[in-house]
Image (cartoon, coloured by chain):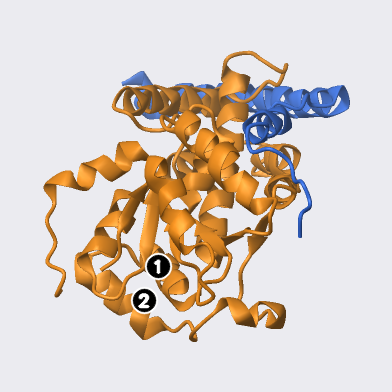
Chain colours: A orange, B blue
C-alpha cells in the first residue's frame, strides 16, 4: 500500500527520495488539483496554490515535470467548459453584457441558477452540471423561429477556442500531457498501460473507472507520487497492495486518521 | 532545465479574465435582433392559436 502525504509533510518526504534513480522527476496532477489552481472559489484554493508556489514550482524550475493524463486533462477542460457557460448564462439573466434571450430560456436559466445556489449552500461548486446545461440548451430551441441557432451562436461566442486558451495557460506553467504514444516519454514509464489493471483498481474499492484509469497510468509511470485532493484516490492508495504514494492537501489527508488499512491487502 | 516558468498564483486571475472577456457590440446587436424576431414570431403564433380556439364550435358550448 502507498502512503498519503500531506502538503505540510511534502518537503521532508521528497527530500528523502529526490535523488533516487528509480524514480522519474515528475508527477501526475489530478483534475481536482488543476481545478483548485484555476478557480479561486474552490474551498482549498489557497492551500493548493500555496503548496504549488512554495513546494512544487521551485522543483519545477529545477527540472521537475508536471503531467496530466487523458483523464485528468479531459476532466479539467470539461470543468472549464461548464464554468465558462455557467458564468456567461448567469450574466445574461442578471442583465450583464447586454444580451437578450428568449423568455423560455431565461426562465430556465433562472430556475437552474436557483438549484445551483442550493447546491452551493451545501458545499458544491456554483457550476451547472451537464444535466442542467442540457435542459437549458433545449429551452433555447423548442418551438423558436430561430431553432437551435441562438444556443449555437452563444456556444460559438462563449466557447470556441477557449479550451485551447485554457490549455495554453497551464502549458506555460509547465503542465505537460503524458502519453505512451510519445516516444520521447518512454523513460517515464515502467510498464504498458492496459485495461485489466484499471478494472482491478476500480474493483478493489469501488473506485470510479475514470479515477482508476488515472491511478493505473500513475502506477505504470516511474513517478513516485501523484497529487490529488480526491478522498477516493487516497482511499484506493491506502487500500491496495503495491500502490505508490499520493500527496494531498492537509485538509483531505487528515480525513484518513480514522481509517485503518491492513498492509497485507 | 532551469527555465523559470510562470507562477500558479496568477492562473486563476488570468482564466477569470478569459471568461469575462467583453463581447463585441456587433455580436450583441445581431443576437438581440434574432431574439426580438423570435419573440415577435412567438407572439404571432400565440395570436393565431387563440383565434383558432375561438373559431372552433366547441368554444361556443
Where residue A122 is drawn, which disc sits there?
none
Residue A146 makes an appearance in the image: no
Position of residue A105 measured from the top left corner of the image (x, y, whole percent): 54, 29
Farthest residue, direction right: B26
Residue A215, which numbered label? 1
Extreme residue toward the top, this view? A95
What residue is shown at x 61% (from left), y 36% (from top)?
A: A84
Q: Are marks 1 and 2 in contact (CB under 8 Å)?
A: yes
- The residue lying toward the viewer, choosing from B53 and B1, is B1
From the image, which quarter does the C terminus of chain A lie in?
A: bottom left
Q: Is residue A5 visible?
A: yes
Quadrant of res A121: top left
Classify residue A68 as left or right of residue B16. left
Query: Which residue is at the front of the view, A154 or B48?
Result: A154
- Secondary structure beneath label 2: helix
Residue A2: where, in percent of width, then height? 30, 65
Q: Is residue A140 above or below residue A179?
A: above
Chain bearing tag 1 is A
Q: Left of A41 or right of it: where is A99?
A: right
Q: Which residue is mark 2?
A: A198
Q: On what subunit does the disc labeled 2 rest?
A: A
Q: Which residue is at 56% across, 71% downward? A: A24
Amino acid at each position: 500500500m502507498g502512503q498519503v502525504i500531506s502538503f505540510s509533510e511534502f518537503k521532508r518526504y521528497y527530500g528523502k527520495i529526490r535523488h533516487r534513480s528509480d524514480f522519474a522527476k515528475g508527477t501526475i496532477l489530478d483534475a481536482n488539483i488543476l481545478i483548485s489552481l484555476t478557480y479561486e472559489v474552490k474551498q482549498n484554493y489557497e492551500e493548493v496554490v500555496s503548496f504549488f508556489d512554495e513546494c512544487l514550482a521551485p522543483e519545477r524550475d529545477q527540472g521537475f515535470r508536471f503531467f496530466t493524463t487523458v483523464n485528468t486533462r479531459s476532466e479539467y477542460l470539461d470543468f472549464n467548459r461548464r464554468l465558462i457557460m455557467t458564468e456567461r448564462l448567469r450574466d445574461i439573466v442578471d442583465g450583464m453584457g447586454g444580451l437578450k434571450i428568449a423568455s423560455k430560456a431565461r426562465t430556465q436559466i433562472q430556475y437552474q441558477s436557483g438549484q445551483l445556489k442550493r447546491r452551493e449552500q451545501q458545499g458544491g461548486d456554483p457550476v451547472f452540471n451537464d444535466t442542467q446545461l442540457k435542459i437549458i440548451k433545449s429551452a433555447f430551441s423548442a418551438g423558436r423561429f430561430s431553432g437551435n441557432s441562438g444556443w449555437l451562436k452563444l456556444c460559438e461566442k462563449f466557447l470556441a477556442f477557449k479550451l485551447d486558451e485554457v490549455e495554453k495557460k497551464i502549458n506555460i506553467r509547465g503542465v505537460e500531457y503524458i502519453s505512451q504514444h510519445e516516444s520521447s516519454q518512454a523513460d517515464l514509464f515502467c510498464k504498458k498501460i492496459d485495461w485489466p489493471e484499471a478494472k482491478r483498481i476500480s474493483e478493489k474499492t469501488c473506485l470510479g473507472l475514470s479515477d482508476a484509469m488515472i491511478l493505473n497510468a500513475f502506477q505504470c509511470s516511474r513517478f513516485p507520487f501523484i497529487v490529488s485532493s480526491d478522498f477516493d484516490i487516497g482511499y484506493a492508495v491506502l487500500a491496495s497492495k503495491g500502490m505508490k504514494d499520493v500527496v494531498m492537501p492537509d485538509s483531505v489527508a487528515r480525513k484518513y486518521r480514522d481509517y485503518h488499512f491492513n498492509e497485507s491487502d | 532545465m532551469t527555465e523559470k516558468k510562470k507562477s500558479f498564483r496568477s492562473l486563476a486571475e488570468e482564466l477569470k479574465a478569459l471568461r469575462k472577456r467583453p463581447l463585441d457590440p456587433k455580436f450583441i446587436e445581431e443576437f438581440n435582433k434574432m431574439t426580438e424576431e423570435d419573440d415577435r414570431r412567438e407572439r404571432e403564433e400565440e395570436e393565431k392559436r387563440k383565434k383558432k380556439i375561438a373559431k372552433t364550435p366547441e368554444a361556443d358550448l
